[in-house]
Amino acid sequence: PGWLLSPAGRPYLESILHKNQRRVFGLLERPALPPTLAVPTVTYKLFLSGKSGVGKTALVAWLAGTPAPPAHHETLGIEATTVFWPAKPRASGRPVLFQLHFWD
């Protein structure tokens, strides 16, 4: 769990941060890593659906590290949010970069 804060994981964490806040990436953007730290990217698309006003948008904002909307407003259509998260699975021992596409 503390791999991201270790000296080996710190460059991966810094690639997704901007001014100590999680950087918001567009659908076609990705973190810039030096060639020596290039890792495979594992992509998942997560579709959230449910009744209006239950907190789907607030959950995605929390997971993305962005502030949740202060007032409730209905999401019209689909709102896509891309989150990158570096990790080092125990089974492989090699870092990977998870790309999570939240569709709310």
Image: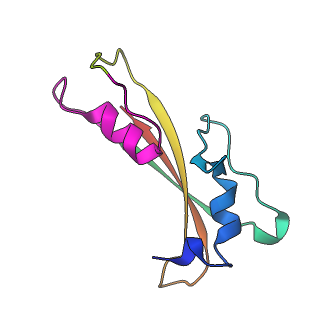
Locate residue 29 relative to residue 54 in the image: left or right: right
Q: Residue drawn 54% across and 83% down? A: 92
Q: Is residue 66 magenta?
A: yes
x and y, in percent, of residue 51 in the image = 15, 27
How many marks on residues? 0
Question: Is 55 placed above or below 85 here?
Answer: above
The structure's colour scheme is rainbow
Q: Which residues are magenta?
A: 48-70
Q: Residue drawn 75% across and 66% down? A: 38
Locate residue 17 relative to residue 45 in the image: left or right: right
x and y, in percent, of residue 69 in the image = 37, 26
Name which quarter of the figure residue 33 lies in.
bottom right
Name which quarter of the figure residue 5 lies in.
bottom right
Report the quarter where the C terminus lies: top left
Name which quarter of the figure residue 102 lies in.
top left
Locate residue 29 relative to residue 78 in the image: left or right: right
Report the quarter where the N terminus lies: bottom left
Secondary structure mainly formed by the magenta segment = loop
Q: Depth check: 9 or 104 in front? A: 9
Q: Depth check: 56 or 10 in front? A: 10
x and y, in percent, of residue 50 in the image = 19, 32
Locate residue 55 relative to residue 16 in the image: left or right: left
Q: Is residue 93 magenta?
A: no
Q: Residue drawn 35% across and 14% down? A: 76
